[in-house]
Image: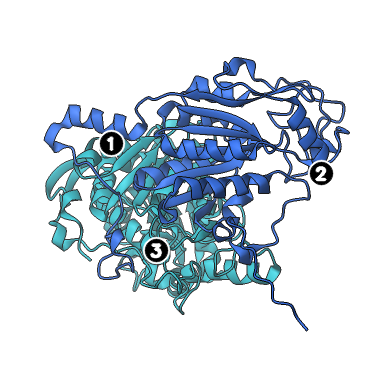
Amino acid sequence: MKADPHGVLTGTHFMDGDHACCEGALAAGARFASGYPITPSTEVVERFAQRVPTVGGSFIQMEDELAASITLQGAVWGGAKAFTVTSGPGFSLMMEHIGYAAMTETPCVFVDVQRGGPSTGLPTLPAQSDMMQARWGSHGDYEIIALCPNSPQECFDLTIKAFNLAEEFRVPVMFMMDEVVGHMTEKVVIPPADEIEVTPRKHTRKSVDEFLPYATNGDQVPEMAHAGEGYRFHVTGLTHDERGYPNMTPATQQKLVNRLLSKVRNAADRIALYEEEATADADVVVVSYGITSRVAQRAIDMARDRGLKVGKLRLITVWPFPENKIRALAARTKAFVVPELNLGQMVREVERASGGKARTIHVPHAGGSVHRPEDILAAIQEAVR
Amino acid sequence: MSTLISPVINPVEPFLRDDRMPHIWCPGCGIGTTVNCFARALIESKIDLNSLAIVSGIGCTGRVAGYVKLDSFHTTHGRAIPFATGLKLANPKLNVVVYSGDGDLSAIGGNHLIHAARRNIDLKVICVNNLIYAMTGGQTAPTTPDHAITSTSPYGTFEPAFNLPHLVEASGAVYVARWTTFHVRQLARSISEAFQKKGFSFIEVISPCPTLYQRRNKLGDGLDTMKYYKEKSKTKNGAPTSEVGLTMSGEIIVGKFVDRDRPDYSELLKAQMQASLGDRYVDYETCATEYGDGGCAEDSCH
């Protein structure tokens, strides 16, 4: 369906990534956010707090990130599209509730504007060091989806995408920004509402007597009801059966957890968004994401000026990891160069997916600034040597 | 041969998920008694059950949400109140009850308890206080009275305990009462009264844990505890909450301690937004998303 025009600030704007993310959420239909202040993410909810009372909705600043990350889930079960926004230490505190959202299949969005860590680290400076935490941070087996924008425009466009994927798969979607993308100001074009596709909630049409909250009808994603509609259903973080009732047996656990994984894994190729360029005859493919992809672009241009055959693969969907794409490229390229603002996270996935068919060269950076293009260029040159 | 006996329907039955019985609570546990009182309060207050949601945390009392035939949410440890806050704000028409234990609400969830009371969010909190962590085997809680033996205080507790009515009154609750599981009529009446209040209401129910608290402290069984509640409870409506702290075998002050009015979160929100934004403020009845052509069976949710 089309976006509700009330939330859409149609026009051409000069806007930073944090604000663009907020506008994306409003355009996607988010009418509730709960947050806790943390640099460099706070601007997202500051803008939401300013905007949402004029659109019809609510923002609440909670007492901590533990609260913020579950308050939004209460709002989702009350009928809202909802999200929270945080950074490093706050993201760590939210992990239990990412697991709760995965287990209870609560569609919602967690925005993480990444900064340097561990611990308090570099509050005002960039990193991409929460990438593995986004995937694995909560206990137990589960799947999430994570998207990684590299510009304010994408902060707008992909936030809408994040909400749409959350609704389609009933999973928490991680929106993995970083300090530079969050604070970078660029042109952001917000289209008219009737050009914005939003995915409605997968709300049941079944009668009260027919409805089973966790029954699936072939497509692995159950239909949802909201509190107050008369269904009188139960939701629990315990292992549960189709009625939503606790059922702590190995058989129920296996059935439930396998479904939580496979509903995302089976759709991985469809979820995979990436930007690919000149990989057909490339000797080396630079695999990057987020802000690092923009530095990588400079390095790629420099390498091409030197006559090197360099392809580009920019990951937009980082989880589920687009391993089929990497596997296909590994069969026809000599090496991957993987720059990222951490000391080795997504590079492990590239290495795993390439299965030894192509060399993988990491260009690490502990965070605090972006890479120097020369460092990525040096890795490209090493790769083709 | 069979004899037809017309079944005597317990008035509470329609409120329970009978397909979830038997429940997990031990013989002599007081939680079931509180659920009975809760159901009777719902009957008495004629609340529309389809507009009522119940939210629990983790623990023995945390299981209440699973047994009552309402929209029910069994959340994470300590976080029933923030979940309930989101539910209430997204759909202000809902009556939202938080039903959980002393450890869940006042230890791991203590921060949310005081902030929800401060905000005066319109939630009805029923706190079953069995003075111990029961689900995990009888560890010390912030409510465990002085010198009691627990599995993590094998030589006796020495940390001062929370006086929960005092804590929530100081934080801003508009309705604060305490009863024991002996005081079933008073408890049911208090729950009914809380439904008439707008704002943060807190009802503490002192409840036995014969398996882990009473047994370890040689306080007898469930029946002995009822006798203790009967003999040592003293009703003092309006008692200063600073004077209602509990000891292991002393007097239990029960009653309605606080019943006051102040604007709740939603009223304050609307007033502030209207004052600042005037006509630009869009008062919302619900934050609910539209469903496109998917639709929902109930007209009321459009």
Mark 2 or mark 1, whichever is nearer to me = 2
Q: Is residue A183 visible?
A: no
The chain in blue = B
Residue A373, given in percent of the width and then of the height, sits at: 35, 46
Q: Is residue A57 visible?
A: yes
A96 above or below B103? below
Q: Colour of chain A?
A: cyan
Residue at 76% across / 41% down in the picture? B209
Give the distance between the C-alpha atoms of the residues marked 3 and 2, in whole angstroms: 65 Å
> Do the residues under discs 3 and 2 have CB atoms within 8 angstroms?
no
Would you name the residue on which mark 1 appears?
Answer: A49
Element under label 3? Answer: strand
Residue at 61% across / 48% down in the picture? B35
Element under label 2? Answer: helix
B228 above or below B10? above
| Relative horizontal placement of residue A306, taking residue B256 as reference (left or right) | left
Earlier residue among tags 1 and 3: 1
Residue B149, given in percent of the width and then of the height, sits at: 84, 30
B126 above or below B242? below
Give the distance between the C-alpha atoms of the residues marked 2 and 1, in whole angstroms: 49 Å
Amino acid under disc 3:
Val
Q: Residues within 10 Å of mark 3 (few under 14, many from 20)?
A: many
Mark 3 or mark 2, whichever is nearer to me = 2
Would you name the residue on which mark 3 appears?
Answer: A285
